[in-house]
Image (cartoon, rainbow, N blue to C red):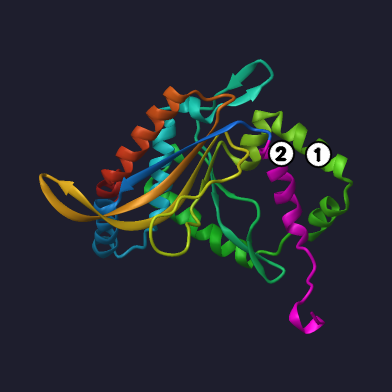
Amino acid sequence: MTEKDYKIIPFPKARQPIVDALRQAKRMNVMHALLEADVTDARRMVKEFRVKTGNPLSFTAFLTFCLAHAVAENKSVQAYRKGGKLVIFDDVDIAVIIEREFEGDKIPINPFVVKAANRKTLNEIHNEISNAKVENINKPQNSSLIDLYWYAPGFIRSLLWYLWLGSPYWRKRLTGTVGFSALGMFGKGTGWGIPISTYSLSVTMGTISQKPALIDGKLETREFLDLTASFDHNVIDGAPAARFITQFKELIESGYGLREAA
């Protein structure tokens, strides 16, 4: 093998916090639920909304809206542990993973947090996410802080993560209460994502595939979205997790909020 067969590039400094976060996340006892949601009607309603209003509306914003309201009705799924107690916040702050450009590479760095998403309209959520994508692509990164973190000894970085994860209030303030990866998975067919997350609840969007389904006694081709709901089993039991999943799926399949937004 010669030097022409490969190239060596610097490891992006901005990825070091991600590496450290993944190391911390592996300490959680996570249970994953793989589910399918029939999004045929919801996707049709999104398209009708765009035609009727002339305004853009992303499917990601719609899912974020549904997620916020499902969590608001089952707030225990976003609980954070603090010693011998659980802290359950009223507001649902959803951290949406968005690709950002850094040093020529597009990578997910810090998630964009939709604060109090359960109190916002569908249009407000869409506008916030859309603006965040543009702002974070064009906005210069704070390279001095990234350099400081990069050169910090490993035990210092671990201590910072220990202190941060031990404070539900700082966790909410910096990265929200629920994680949502809307990057999806590339390719055709059925596919679920299995995340490594530091959240008590994180939802990962997979692929959308077409499958036959029995609707009112008739066989139809429908569109199904693959979703993964991941829970920290240290603080969330199966029963509340199941209730959340049921409601989240119902909201998606009913096109919750789309008629009101139009």
Q: Is residue 2 left or right of residue 175?
A: right
Q: Is the residue marked by circle 1 packed among few (<14), some (14-19), or many (20+) residues within 10 Å?
A: some
Which amino acid type corresponds to the residue marked 2 in the rendered image?
Answer: Gln
Q: Residue at x 17, y 54 (%)?
A: 220
Residue 49 on image: x %, y %: 27, 58
Foreground of the two, 157 or 8: 8
Q: Is residue 141 visible?
A: yes
Residue 59: x and y, percent?
Answer: 38, 55
In the image, is residue 73 above or below residue 20? above
* C-alpha separation, residue under disc 2 versus residue under disc 1: 8 Å
**Between 227 and 56, the one nearer to me in the picture:** 227
Q: Position of residue 106 (x, y in %)?
A: 63, 66
List x then y, in percent, for residue 67.
42, 40
Helix, strand or loop for the magenta stretch, by majority:
helix
Q: Which residues are magenta?
A: 1-26
- Under circle 1, the secondary element is helix
Q: What residue occupies the far top of the structure in this picture?
A: 84
The residue wearing badge 2 is 24
Q: Identify the residue under disc 1.
A: 158
Q: Residue at x 72, y 50 (%)?
A: 19
Closer to the chain start, of discs 2 and 1, is 2
